């Protein structure tokens, strides 16, 4: 079988740097948070671990108020998402609704843990020798340790790896491209823990049965490349290459990065595994390495605390559940002109209304912006169809026309204009001279589509039920009618039978009557 | 470091948490800025009339903008301050004779701003280019006033100062002996059209001092300065290259075979480009995003369409120049073109 040109291009991944459509060159603003080495902040008084770490699914709590928990003990589980573990040893003070660092801004169930400071570990079960362990064993270990995509999407890693194992994957891509301004947690991780990343890469490669690993980093991350290559050489691991890509927002998006490395586009509605590729964040790889070799569950992550609203920006290795206010206090507090608190970067991050919310698996960056950084509330003007939004759209959509369809409630055209392909990167928002909140409209549109899909499914179900009921009633009616006719037939048969009996009796009587004395002679018909 | 840090509340706001890069007003201001060299050249060659017309048209445009916004119950401040009405006014003023009477602007802006723009829903909603609607309305309604063109001051026997210009525009009478006839002259395109129609040959017609190297004397230089302004807009990415390239390229390509076949009755391609409104339209009018096409391929088709219709009108139509009609006709076609030139999406 000859490989298709697409296969060939996918195998060539990383040999040449390609371009993706649109995008923006933004000011990095990363150096301010990279000056100090990463440290663990002192333990906070209380840790607040939300049971909702991922869109949609709330985990079921495995502990109760008053329970003593150990560091690394599972405290929440839910079937499709990653498990949740206690970040410290201590006591469960409460399980109650708290602000939980979620784009919805809502409160949700959180496990509140008061640390005892003893840091007693739950029994850990590392994999004995990952180089001989089977893919299933490794995936189970990843699942047990609650590893999820640390790039921000928090997609459960075991699900992605299981899908990858079942497909023919040749290349594992590790995404070290942060691309959003300000965020530097992955860069710091690559600087400080390159060995762990390389180890994680080798483990993931083994799970996938892939041949090669590409680690993509931004072209302005100086020493990182050397450190990673050095570790790969030290581990005597072949086919691991580190590739610098130009820093253009949103290159850290999975689909954009794949396009830059291969020149190929992930098919609409498809996944990178369709091209034989799997993409993981570098921090996820490091977490996998710890989970497999030491059995450590995912309970902490690198978090950048930065922005002009922070007096001393830096990176932390923070336990999940650490209140953001605690991290900020460890950075010397806020500057006076702080105006907005954002989780994530300035382009795609979501605002928080309180800093009592905790660090969760998705929190890569705490960004405190000053008044000058953010826009004054802008008057929305009508679209003048300048087309800038289409020029910068990495998904190659026509944002202004898409927005118009959504505004008019035209859901089918909105889908045709590629609503579901929007990656919500915000490039269109930034360049729009009319200040139309395009991404807000797209989020609303996507939510509406989901709602309509659910409604449609419900209507479909109701319709099916109704039809089945009608059918059943009809069938019953028919059956009843049939029964009736059968009964009638039987009755009829019975009457005829009785007639016959009567006739026979009469005949017999006649016969008797016709006997010699013949007194009772009748004229009964012989039927 | 506080043992129990105080929590703090924040106001929330939508992403991106970065000030927007531009505004409608900034876009319009850049267009106005890009028109400055051309307007200055116009003044240099044809006297101060154009400045008066720009002022008049702007005043009327803003007045009708204000009136329509009030009638429609729309907020005044953002829309008055977006400069879009001024852009319409300036582009219109550049189309009419510099000594056109004041009421021409008034009527034109009533139709351009009041009808073509606001009756269709205001900024961003107009199907037709308001400046071109304004121009075509007065061109058809007042042919006399719209064809009284001046020769370049260098060629004129009498040229008018600012006071005389004002007097002419506001009274409709030329304060000179001989009146209108003493100062007006046919435009190069008029001359060409009537000349060819009366059987004269193009090289012969071009002997008139009113012609320069390519187009009309003076006009070709104004066109150059407009092109320079257009390049500024290209550089600032206010306009995309597709429309100007398509308009000018199509004019050159399409007029070439006619000229090669019969150079006596067809002007040469560069003369087409540098005559009339082609350059202004290529950079400033056909590039209007609201009434034009959105996709790159659509913009190429739109520009080519403008060029074709202009050439057809110039060659076979009743008007010496047809850019305004061409733009309006292509405005009608723009939604359809957009529909059939939708770009491919990622992964599609």
Image (cartoon, coloured by chain):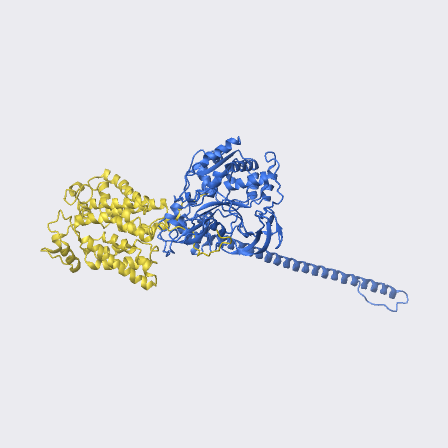
Name which quarter of the figure residue A143 lies in.
top right
Question: Residue B305, percent across and down?
Answer: 31, 46
Residue, far right = A517
Residue, far bottom = A519
A321 is higher (above) or lower (below) than A481 = above
Q: Nearer the viewer, residue B85 or A468?
A: B85
Q: Nearer the viewer, residue A344 or A527?
A: A344
Q: Nearer the viewer, residue B276 or A280?
A: A280
Residue, far left = B177
Q: Left or right: where does residue A170 sit relative to residue B147? A: right
Name which quarter of the figure residue A168 lies in.
top right
Is residue B86 visible in this depiction of the protein?
yes
Q: Which chain is blue?
A: A
Q: Left or right: where does residue B158 sit relative to residue B120? A: left
Question: Residue A334, percent across and down?
Answer: 43, 52
In the rendered picture, chain B carries what hue? yellow
Is residue A238 visible in this depiction of the protein?
no
């Amino acid at each position: 079988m000859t490989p298709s040109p697409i296969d060939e291009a996918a195998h060539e991944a990383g040999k040449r740097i390609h371009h993706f459509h649109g995008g923006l060159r933004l000011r990095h603003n990363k150096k301010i948070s990279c000056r100090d080495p990463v440290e663990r902040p002192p333990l906070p008084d209380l840790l607040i671990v939300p049971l909702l770490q991922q869109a949609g699914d709330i985990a079921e709590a495995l502990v109760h108020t008053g329970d003593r928990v150990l560091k690394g003990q599972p405290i929440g589980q839910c079937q499709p998402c990653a498990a949740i573990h206690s970040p410290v040893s201590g006591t469960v003070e409460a399980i109650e609704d708290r602000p939980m660092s979620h784009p919805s801004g809502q409160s949700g169930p959180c496990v509140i843990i008061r640390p005892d400071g003893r840091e007693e570990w739950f029994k850990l079960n590392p994999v004995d020798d990952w180089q001989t362990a089977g893919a299933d064993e490794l995936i189970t270990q990843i699942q047990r340790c609650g590893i999820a995509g640390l790039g921000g999407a928090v997609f459960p890693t075991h699900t992605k790896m299981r899908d990858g194992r079942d497909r023919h994957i040749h290349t594992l891509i590790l995404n070290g491209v942060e691309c959003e301004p300000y965020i530097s947690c992955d860069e710091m991780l690559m600087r400080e823990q390159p060995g762990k990343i390389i180890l994680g890469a080798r483990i993931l490669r083994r799970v996938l049965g892939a041949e090669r690993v590409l680690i993509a980093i931004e072209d302005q991350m100086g020493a990182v490349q050397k450190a990673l290559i050095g570790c790969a050489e030290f581990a005597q691991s072949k086919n691991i290459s580190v590739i610098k890509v130009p820093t253009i927002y949103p290159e850290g998006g999975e689909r954009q990065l794949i396009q830059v490395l291969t020149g190929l586009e992930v098919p609409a509605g498809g996944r990178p595994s369709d091209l034989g590729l799997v993409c993981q964040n570098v921090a996820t790889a490091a977490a996998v390495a710890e989970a497999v070799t030491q059995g450590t569950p995912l309970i902490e992550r690198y978090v950048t605390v930065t922005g002009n609203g922070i007096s001393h920006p830096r990176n932390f290795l923070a336990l999940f559940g650490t209140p953001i206010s605690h991290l900020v206090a460890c950075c010397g507090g806020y500057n006076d002109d702080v105006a907005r608190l954002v989780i994530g970067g300035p382009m795609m991050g979501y605002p928080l209304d309180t800093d009592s919310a905790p660090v969760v698996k998705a929190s890569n960056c705490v960004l405190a912006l000053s008044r000058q950084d953010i826009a004054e509330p802008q008057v929305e003007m009508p679209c003048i169809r300048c087309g800038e939004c289409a020029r910068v759209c990495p998904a190659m959509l026509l944002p202004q026309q898409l927005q118009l369809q959504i505004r008019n409630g035209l859901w089918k055209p909105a889908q045709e204009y590629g609503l579901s392909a929007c990656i919500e990167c915000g490039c269109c928002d930034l360049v729009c001279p009319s200040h139309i909140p395009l991404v807000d409209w797209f989020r609303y549109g996507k939510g509406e589509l989901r709602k309509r899909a659910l409604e449609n499914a419900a209507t479909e179900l109701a319709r099916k039920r109704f039809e089945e009921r009608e059918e059943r009633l009809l069938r019953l009616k028919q059956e009843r009618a049939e029964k009736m006719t059968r009964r009638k037939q039987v009755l009829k048969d019975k009457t005829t039978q009785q007639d016959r009996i009567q006739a026979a009796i009469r005949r017999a009587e006649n016969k008797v009557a016709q006997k010699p004395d013949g007194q009772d002679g009748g004229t009964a018909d012989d039927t | 470091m506080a043992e129990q840090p105080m929590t703090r509340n924040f106001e929330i706001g939508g992403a991106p948490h970065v000030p927007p890069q531009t505004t409608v007003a900034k876009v319009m201001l850049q267009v106005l800025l890009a028109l400055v060299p051309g307007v200055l050249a116009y003044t240099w060659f044809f006297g101060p009339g154009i400045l008066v017309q720009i002022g008049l048209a702007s005043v009327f445009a803003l007045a009708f903008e204000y009136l329509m916004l009030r009638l429609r119950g729309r907020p005044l401040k953002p829309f008055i301050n977006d400069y879009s009405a001024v852009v319409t006014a300036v582009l219109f003023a550049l189309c009419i004779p510099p000594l056109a009477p004041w009421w021409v602007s008034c009527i034109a802006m009533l139709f351009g701003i009041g009808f073509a723009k606001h009756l269709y829903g205001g900024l961003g909603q107009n199907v037709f280019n308001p400046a071109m609607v304004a121009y075509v309305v007065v061109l058809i309604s007042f042919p006399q006033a719209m064809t009284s063109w001046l020769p370049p001051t260098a060629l004129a026997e009498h040229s008018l100062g600012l006071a005389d210009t004002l007097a002419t525009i506001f009274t409709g009478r030329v304060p000179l002996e001989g009146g209108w006839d003493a100062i007006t002259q046919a435009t190069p395109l008029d001359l060409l059209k009537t000349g060819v129609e009366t059987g004269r040959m193009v090289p012969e017609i071009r002997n008139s001092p009113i012609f320069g190297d390519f187009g009309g004397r003076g006009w070709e230089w104004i066109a150059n300065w407009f092109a320079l302004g257009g390049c500024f807009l290209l550089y600032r990415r206010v306009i995309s290259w597709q429309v100007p390239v398509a308009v000018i390229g199509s004019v050159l390509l399409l007029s070439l075979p006619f000229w090669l076949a019969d150079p006596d009755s067809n002007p040469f391609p560069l003369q087409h480009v540098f005559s009339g409104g082609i350059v202004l339209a290529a950079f400033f009018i056909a590039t209007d995003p609201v009434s034009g096409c959105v996709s790159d391929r659509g913009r190429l088709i739109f520009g080519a369409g403008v060029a074709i219709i202009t050439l057809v009108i110039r060659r076979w139509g009743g008007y010496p120049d047809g850019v305004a009609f061409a733009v309006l006709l292509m405005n009608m076609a723009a939604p359809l073109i957009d529909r059939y030139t939708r770009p491919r999406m990622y992964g599609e």
